[in-house]
Amino acid sequence: MRTALLVSLLTLLTGFAAPAAADPAVPPGFRPASTSWTGPAAGYVLGYVPCANSWCPALLATADGGRHWRRLGAPPMALPDNHNHVALTVISDRVAYVSDGVHLLATRDSGVSWHPLGLLGAREPYYLAKVAEAGGRVFAVLTTFGDGRGSTLLYSAAAGVPVLAPVPGFAVTGGITYGDVATGGGVQVSLGADYGTERYWTSRDGVRFTPADPPCPPGTVASLAGVRDRQVVALCGSSPGSPQPGSTARSLRHAPSLGGVFSGGDAAPAAGITQGFAAASPSSATVAAEGGGSGFLHRTADGGRTWTTTVLSDRGLSLTDLDFPGGGTGVVVDGRPDADGGSAVYRTTDDGRTWREVRFGA
């Protein structure tokens, strides 16, 4: 019988609450918006600080798991009035991308300079949902919408090229469209429409793609994780609000290798609307969800047979950037910088069993 154990974060954080000394690299009033880590100890946090009746960006980096921070050149990306997530994607200590869903900036010199990337043929309204780099190429998933009809396309270009273009054949259209791209052990692309049309491709080099059977059964949407110990893990989710408001039916699926056939279907807890998905290993995976004014982290350590649920906070706005960069370490951002409840970065060092808030100052 599957279990769903609700764990209070206050209990989990016992022993971690000692105040941190002020770090001179952290500007006063810093509130995180997005985080991206290239390893267990090497992380980057893009945040905002109050300035002149507005919010100014600030970019921090750590090499020791958040004990100390250094300041990098921040991208000129305003905090959107429409509450779009400002997403930071760091590829290496020199290369990073940031997007507010409409604009895309890149640096290839550790933040010394930031340059806009164009999206050939893209016309607003659209939303840039995901950016990744692998095999010397940049990939982006872009969804256009309007008049009850939309499309989701895969954009790509060689790394360093200032304009991304649609990849021929990688597009779906419908009333509701969506997609995902995952890197690590290869490249995976999933595109879908109206919870009925699902397409899926894999590539080992980021150049040559092969169609494969979709990870998820009809009626569900795939959220992709990278290859973990040669296996591929995907989360299959129903439309938001199903089977009831504030919930999402979910199941975990596995493939034995990149391009292999997915199987399984162990049900995950349904509480909350899915905000993110990441796998630390083939057996350990976590779902970030929001519902009823609370943030949930649903975790399995046995491939989906049983689950535990951590109630992360009562901010109840968004959980973003969930990722496990290695060594049992994971991160997630809770809330938004301009929200009444603010925002925070949480980090785990035990595959998601316990989480603690990353402290940026006194």
Image (cartoon, rainbow, N blue to C red):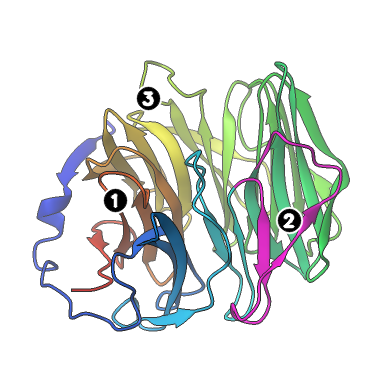
Q: CA distance from mark 1 to mark 3?
A: 24 Å
Left or right, residue 355 beside residue 208: left
Please give the residue where the numbered disc 2 appears in the rendered image.
139
Q: Secondary structure at mark 1?
A: loop
Q: Describe the element under mark 2 as helix, strand or loop.
A: strand
The answer to whether 211 appears left or right of 254 in the picture is right
Q: Where is 219 relative to 272, above or below? A: above
Which residue is depicted at the point 74% across and 20% down? Answer: 149
Q: Which mark is residue 247?
A: 3
Specify the amino acid type for callout 2: Phe
Cα separation, mark 3 vs mark 2, equals: 30 Å
Give the percent coordinates (x, y) of residue 146.
Answer: 71, 23
- Magenta segment's dominant SS is loop
**Disc 3 crowd, CA 10 A, few/some/many (<14, 14-19, 20+):** many
Looking at the image, is 279 positioned above or below residue 127?
below
The numbered mark at residue 287 is none
Q: In front: mark 2 or mark 1?
A: 1
- What range is drawn magenta here? 101-127
Whichever of callouts 2 and 1 sits on the residue coming sooner in the sequence is: 2
Mark 1 or mark 3, whichever is nearer to me: 1
Crowd around label 1: few <14 · some 14–19 · many ≥20 (10 Å): some
Q: In the rendered image, which residue does mark 1 sit on?
A: 342
Q: Position of residue 129 (x, y in %)?
A: 62, 45
Task: Between residue 176 and residue 206, name the one nearer to us.
Answer: 176
